[in-house]
Image: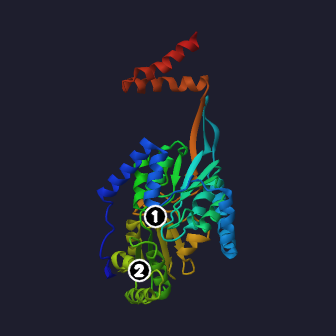
Amino acid sequence: MEYIKKPLAKTAEQSNSVKEAVAEIIDKIRQTGDAGLAEYNQKFDGLTRETPWVQRDEIEQAYQEVDPDLIASMKVAAERIKAFAELQRDATREVPETEMIPGLYLGAKLIPIESVLCYVPGGNAPLFSTAMMLAIPAATAGVKNIIACSPPMKGTQSIHPATLVALDLCGVTQIAVMGGAQAIAAFAYGTETIQPVDLIVGPGNQYVTEAKRQAYGQVGIDFVAGPSEVLIIADDSGQPEVIAADLLAQAEHDTNAVATLITTSKELATQVDQAVNRQLEDLPTKVIAQESWRDNGAIIVVPTLEEATILSNNLAPEHLEVITNQEFDYDQLTNYGSLFIGPYTAEVFGDYTSGTNHTLPTSRAARYTGGVSVNTFLKTVTYQRIEREGFDALKEPTKMMAGNEGLEAHRQAITKREAFLKA
């Protein structure tokens, strides 16, 4: 393995100061409710609204402010996202009540989560696509109460119009103008005017991420997400300019974003390195992308695609592209958030319009979890029904196991039934 371009730094672990600051925010909102929430909303976002809840007239005004062509594009994306979510929902089946042995019946049901908060980041640009990626699968799963929140545009009291339109198109029940750790705390624990939700989904900055981590248990979360990542595996058939563009598409997200190329061609590696630097010169997001590429970008040359596969599985990237004209065993790729196959399959299609979800695991979490999907919003619950014949078959081994664990009340739950049945 040879580095043509090596990262200068690794993304640092969250500092104790972030953890302590978030803990303070959560504690204050738990203690003071709406008053604490209003204080933090004003402190961090300059919010002085009488109510954080978006009214219908604000949504209608947003439609007037958004380019009709953008709305049409959103509808294309929404159609694709919904169609794929429906496929996933239909592939996740309930287990009908089944007689396992005479008198023992088992089954499983799928029940939608009752209330969900979709956290939609604002930051430097509106991420209305994330609004769609969160709300549409929730609606497809059958969640009744889908709430969304997003921070206001800088210097205003309003969410970006494009985000409002996207949320409205996706069937969100309520929209709140707020962001940051204080929003996570409010919807996890509740205030006088905010009912706590059952699940919080969506990415955010380090404070939002840490708030989700600390609130987990009180409320469900999708996962703890870090900076965006892409890893590209390519042989000598790869086009340097295209690969460079895909690397920069991730790098422009955030100064901590990670963009990596693993290739079997040293010539391609050198050409991509040069192409990245050329494309950076004219990139409107150069300030962010250049720092990200400088600190976290990597170009690695390996002797074989098999070695590239091993390295990729170890890195477990959020997005994984494979560009090759050789036979390739895709089943050997086991750790990734979403896979993009072939030179036409730009990762940005997954960000917007192909239909798969772009809220994906980062920081090697793809080793043990997938991304947000319709299944994120469904609970699989089991049930059982035991008749006399099943009771007689299971009573003795159950009493034996309970007795040997020293749990006498467990054992008596069976013996009392035996006495009742004999009466």
Element type at marker 2? helix
Q: How crowded is mark 1: few (under 14 residues within 10 Å), some or many (20 or more)?
A: some
Q: Residue at x 49, y 74 (%)?
A: 321
> How far is the residue under mark 2 from the one under mark 1?
34 Å
Where 335 sits versus 271, above or below? above
Question: Which is more N-terminal, label 1 or label 2?
Answer: 2
Q: Which of 405 and 268 is in front in this view?
A: 268
The reply, left or right, for residue 366 in relation to residue 17 is right
Q: Which of 209 and 18 is in front in this view?
A: 18
Q: Which residue is drawn at 41% across and 70% down?
A: 312
Q: Nearer the viewer, residue 402 or 35?
A: 35
Element type at marker 1? loop
Percent position of residue 132, x then y: 60, 63
Q: Nearer the viewer, residue 415 or 197?
A: 197
Percent position of residue 348, x then y: 55, 74
**In this rendering, which labeled residue sits more in front, label 2 or label 1?**
2
The reply, left or right, for residue 338 in relation to residue 386 is left
Q: For mark 2, what is the residue?
A: 287
- Looking at the rendered image, the quarter that the N terminus falls into is bottom left
